[in-house]
Amino acid sequence: MTFSRAIKIAPSILSADFANFGAECEAIEAQGCDWVHVDVMDGHFVPNLTFGPATCAAIRKHIKGVMDVHLMIAPVDPYIDAFAQAGADVLTAHLEAGPHIHRTLQAIRAHGIKAGLALNPATGLDSLSYLLDMVDLVCVMTVNPGFGGQKFIHSQVDKVRALRAMIGDRPIHIEIDGGVTPETAPLVAAAGADVLVAGSGVFKGGSVANPAPYGENIRAIRAAAEATRQA
Ligand SMILES: O=C(CO)[C@H](O)[C@H](O)COP(=O)(O)O
Ligand SMILES: [Fe+2]
């Protein structure tokens, strides 16, 4: 993975057909997405359950590009090895998921993959200043984690702007997760985000049998984000 601040669209398969993940991943890649975002939920850290490392390993075989795994689980440390071995290119843990996030990030990087740090909407940037040499991606949650299809939380745009200033020239991605649409994408892109996760915003209107809407949705989000970058 070479580092670039170009806009990347990362569809969240939380909004895909759960009985058809392989074909869904192939469809969104064929329709022009950049990364595939995989949401792991444990029913404890967040009030919803999805799947574990075996499903991630199965999905991996159907993704040619970057598999971006978002762990919404606590504790997280006992599962880092399993998700790394499942083929994650980026493995993201939550700052709020345990008392030893520095150790968690070390454990992810020990696998030679990118370490991501996710922040809930109510979490500030203070602790991050001590972790900047340990992260390859910071994920700003623009919804409370746990469900797709929620409304974008506008207070997070200022956080993205402050994060952009804090990161400076370091090769760290800023990822936005939750409520991304052609209306909200320009706000976060202008503030400095480069990875835009979108679940409902990409999958709406389409299916494996009719994937063209996936491409239209991806292009609409990308165009809106890129327009504000150039403005
Ligand atoms: O991590 C997540 C939820 O916790 C999902 O990635 C996120 O919600 C994407 O879904 P949508 O674009 O529909 O908001
Ligand atoms: Fe996510």
Image (spheres, rainbow, N blue to C red):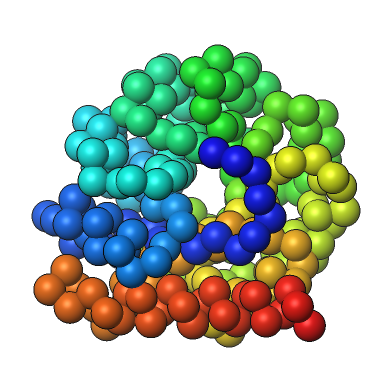
Pick the front one: 217 or 94: 217
**Picture coordinates of residue 198, whole percent (x, y):** 45, 66
Q: Is residue 93 left or right of residue 212?
A: right
Residue 73 location, quadrant: top left
Question: Which of the image's four quarters has the C terminus?
Answer: bottom right
Quarter-wise, where is residue 12 in the image? bottom left
- In the image: residue 36, left or right of residue 122: left
Is residue 229 placed above or below 85 in the rendered structure? below
Looking at the image, which is closer to me, 116 or 156?
116
Q: Nearer the viewer, residue 101 or 84?
A: 84
x 52%, y 27%: residue: 113
Residue at point 39%, 52% (across, down)? 36
Query: Vertically, is 230 above or below 116?
Result: below
Q: Quadrant of the N terminus?
A: top right
- How far across and how far down the image is residue 66, in percent? 43, 44
Q: Is residue 205 visible?
A: yes
Residue at image point 65% right, 44% down: 3
Displayed quadrant of residue 129 = top right
Question: Where does the image place residue 98, in percent across and percent down from the top left?
Answer: 57, 27
How many numbered marks have been drawn onto this rendered protein structure? 0
Q: Is residue 71 left or right of residue 190?
A: left
Q: At 68% across and 55% down in the image, what residue appears?
A: 5
Residue 40 x/y as whole percent: 36, 42
Residue 181 in sight here? no
Check the image and report above or below for 186 versus 42: below
